[in-house]
Amino acid sequence: MIQVGVIGCGKIAQTRHLPEYADHAQVNIAAVYDLDFERAKGVAKTYGARACASVEELLADKHIEAVSVCVANASHFEVSAAAMRAGKHVLCEKPMAVTLEQCEEMVRISEETGRYLMIGHNQRLTKTHLRAKELVSQGEIGKVLSFRTTFGHSGPESWMIDRSNNWFFDKSRAQFGALADLGVHKTDLIQFLTGKRIRKVTAKLNTLHKTDDAGKKLDVDDHAVCIYEMEDGIVGTMTAGWTYYGREDNSTVLYGTEGIMYIYCDENFSIVIEKKDGSRVCHQIDRIQTNTDQTKSGIIDAWVACLLEKKQPGISGAEALSAMKAIFAASESSRTGRTVEVK
């Protein structure tokens, strides 16, 4: 039985980490922590865990082998680093950290301590995305030439447990907006599907509509459009937004030399392939999660499998670093008005 701790008991912890840990026969939730101690006590009661008054108290528990880090973005590095140095394996929510230096240091600490570091890029784990990667690898649409991938919904205010304390809109705690909240998922995904790394980024980040309680525009982006130039000449767009005030858009389209693959675009089929000869192949595998329709993400099962089998996670810190480099490049590109090379 693996003993785990959960640091941060907000929406993502209560929707994904805690119930999925509780559903796993080989996991016990030993302890939880939250800035709101009353919230931590309520969560602890629900899951038969101990509520800790500090991160340090939780990390001092020698029985805990692994932790989920579900705190605000700006604290990801500090908490993850402390956990690994305390001998805990770490599953950290995305975005990995808020500076490239912090991301690189997290990878270094993981290597130094021998502790696993996994980042919550769960989109690559959906059954449809896994099947889409297989089909691309099998040449179903030939060589991928271009793509467009989108993740947009109405914003995190519809997701928060405590809407009066929306850290997503606080630049000091979030650092990024929609780009790193949603765009990092699609950035990781497009590299996963194509098997190619992003090499150059041209981006525009905007605050189109979101305001704070006083009606002032946010200091973080609510919309981002990126042009990604990848290895082997693949060029495509990634769009992320908190300004999609209808149905969520979580779609990807791959344009190949032999046809087009539509992923989570169709009402009835999760993958539709249209060949250049006019033929059409449809697959109904699953439905993508939405904020209002959450299903099991697969991230906890993948994480626990790594712990049980004592193997490095596929979505390791080192793997996630390449997506984060593209995110930082996008931010720089928007700020400077130039195309930025991903080193």
Image (spheres, rainbow, N blue to C red):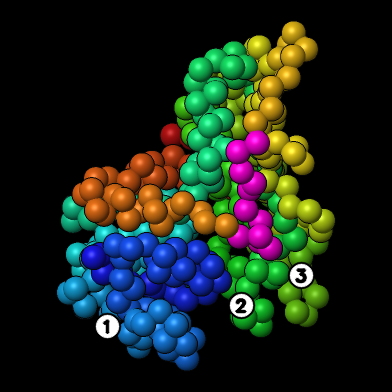
Contact, mark 1 vs mark 2 (Cβ under 8 Å) = no
Badge nearest the viewer, 3 or 1: 1
Q: Measuring 62% from the left and 17% from the top, which residue is drawn there?
A: 141
Which amino acid type corresponds to the residue marked 1 in the rendered image? Glu
Q: Position of residue 177 (x, y in %)?
A: 63, 59
**Observer-nearest residue: 235 or 338?**
235
Looking at marks 1 and 2 on the same chain, the residue that comes earlier in the sequence is marked by 1
Q: Position of residue 216 (x, y in %)?
A: 77, 73
- Of all residues, the one furthest to the bottom in this rendering is 38
Q: CA distance from mark 1 to mark 2?
A: 25 Å
Q: Position of residue 38 (x, y in %)?
A: 47, 91
How many C-alpha atoms fall within 10 Å of the one at disc 1: few (<14), some, or many (≥20)?
few
Residue 172 visible in rendering? no
Residue 310 visible in rendering? yes
Magenta part mainly helix, strand or loop? loop
Callout 3: SS? loop
306 horizontally vs 129: left or right: left
Badge nearest the viewer, 2 or 3: 2
Q: CA distance from mark 2 to mark 3?
A: 19 Å
Label 2 sits on residue: 161
Specify start and end residues of the magenta stretch as a single range: 284-294
**Observer-nearest residue: 261 or 128?**
128
Label 1 sits on residue: 57
Callout 2: SS? loop
Q: Measuring 41% from the left and 57% from the top, which residue is drawn there?
A: 300
Label 3 sits on residue: 211
Callout 1: SS? helix
Which amino acid type corresponds to the residue marked 2 in the rendered image? Ile
Q: Measuring 59% from the left and 73% from the top, which residue is drawn there?
A: 167
Looking at marks 2 and 3 on the same chain, the residue that comes earlier in the sequence is marked by 2
Q: Position of residue 179 (x, y in %)?
A: 62, 51
